[in-house]
Image (cartoon, rainbow, N blue to C red):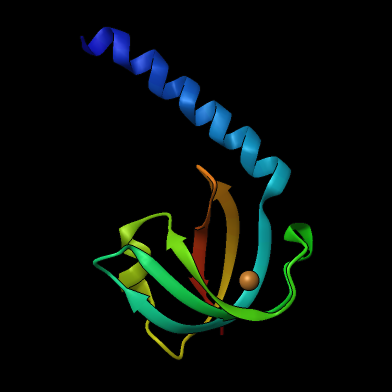
Amino acid sequence: MKATKLPTAILGLAIAGAAIAQSAGDATGKVAKIDVSAGKITIDHGPIKSLDMPAMTMVFKAGEDSMLKAVKPGDRVKFTVDRVNGQLTVIKLEKAK
Ligand SMILES: [Cu+2]
């Protein structure tokens, strides 16, 4: 079982990597709300050119649960957004100084 699952996982990662290269967008913003149980983060963000998005406050899915614990409402952040399974997802998040 394990031997057949592993190659599929590697292929999946390769596909995700290709998608990130095409559509990911970098942005800055301020955390407005964090919903740990839903795995979501609301960010008051600046324009994201590659996604053709003006500045707004919106909800993103968090790519990793650890992101929701690394920041808190009011924190300024730098982040990268990509569409994962059709949902705008924060794939990288760090506190801005
Ligand atoms: Cu937006």
Q: Residue furthest front?
A: 86
Q: Quadrant of residue 20?
A: top right
Rendered-image quarter of ligand 1? bottom right
* Quarter of the N terminus within the rendering: top left
Disc tally is: 0
Please say if 37 is above or below 10: below
Point out residue 29 in the picture as x, y percentages from the top left corner. 60, 80
Q: Quadrant of residue 44?
A: bottom right
Q: Quadrant of residue 58?
A: bottom right
Please say if 8 is above or below 37: above
Q: Can the viewer see residue 45?
A: no
For this rendering, which residue is in front, 95 or 48? 48
For this rendering, which residue is in front, 50 or 7? 50
Would residue 6 appear left or right of 84 to someone viewing this image?
left
Point out residue 94 in the picture as x, y percentages from the top left corner. 50, 70
Point out residue 4 in the picture as x, y percentages from the top left corner. 30, 8
Please say if 41 is above or below 30: above
Would residue 70 appear left or right of 20 to someone viewing this image?
left
Residue drawn at (79%, 64%), measured in percent from left and top? 49
Q: Residue furthest bottom?
A: 74
Residue drawn at (51%, 59%), measured in percent from left and top? 92
* Quarter of the C terminus within the rendering: bottom right
Residue drawn at (58%, 36%), measured in percent from left and top? 17
Point out residue 81 in the picture as x, y percentages from the top left corner. 59, 59
